[in-house]
Amino acid sequence: MNPTISAGQLMDLVIDEIWNHGELEMADALFTDEYVNHGGLIPDLLRGPEAVKLSAVLYRSAFPTFHIEVDEVTSEREAIVVRWVAHSRPPLMDDAVPREGGLRGITRCRLQDGKIAESWTVWDSRATLVRLDASNMTPWLTSQRPLRMPAYDG
């Protein structure tokens, strides 16, 4: 990892600047050209910083008040694990984001030369679909093979 930036600072930039504020150009500095997203909205379909930009635009368009809070960041060598909660605030709400009812997830990132090269995200999709009254998607979800994050082998 780049010695001038900590794992926590890297994830703060990714989450706060790109996801929470829509500063998409930050993806060019924080993700490798070969970056692969192994989970989320568009897994493995698009690579590099453009994959991050497209995902952020899609989520922020669907949920205009989309906001992510970091619960915990841990790192070891070339890996970062982030535990997070995402919310979509009602338009008239003040800056306080209620923690109950948020979408919780975990993202593991593999770093290469101080940038994010791969990520794996696991989130509570079934509970989210129930809250969105899209429970008819449950058979599709249960037919999908589980996403497995590789163990760190370094």
Image: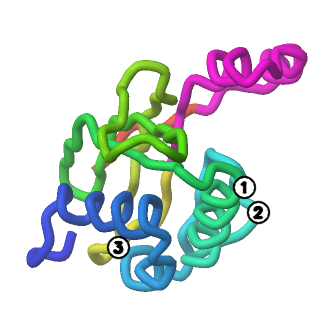
Q: Residue at x 22, y 43 (%)?
A: 73
Q: Residue at x 82, y 22 (%)?
A: 134
3 or 1: tag closer to the N-terminus: 1
**SS for dot 3:** strand
Disc 1 target residue = 42
Disc 1 crowd rating (10 Å Cα; few below 14, some 14-19, many 20+) is some
62 magenta-colored:
no
Q: Nearer the viewer, mark 1 or mark 2?
A: 1
Residues at marks 3 and 2, CA–CA distance in whole angstroms: 20 Å
Residue 45: which numbered mark, if any? 2
Disc 3 crowd rating (10 Å Cα; few below 14, some 14-19, many 20+) is many
125 magenta-colored:
yes
Q: Nearer the viewer, mark 3 or mark 1?
A: 1
Disc 3 target residue = 115
Q: Residue at x 20, y 48 (%)?
A: 75
CB contact under 8 Å: marks 3 and 2: no
132 relative to 1 in the view: left or right: right
Q: Looking at the image, which residue sits at the far left?
A: 4
Q: Amino acid at mark 2?
A: Leu
Q: Amino acid at mark 3?
A: Lys
Q: Nearer the viewer, residue 118 or 41?
A: 41
Q: Where residue 50 appears, x then y in whole percent?
A: 62, 77
Q: Where residue 71 appears, x then y in whole percent?
A: 26, 35
Rendered position, 66 above or below 5: above
CB contact under 8 Å: marks 1 and 2: yes
First to last magenta residue range: 120-147
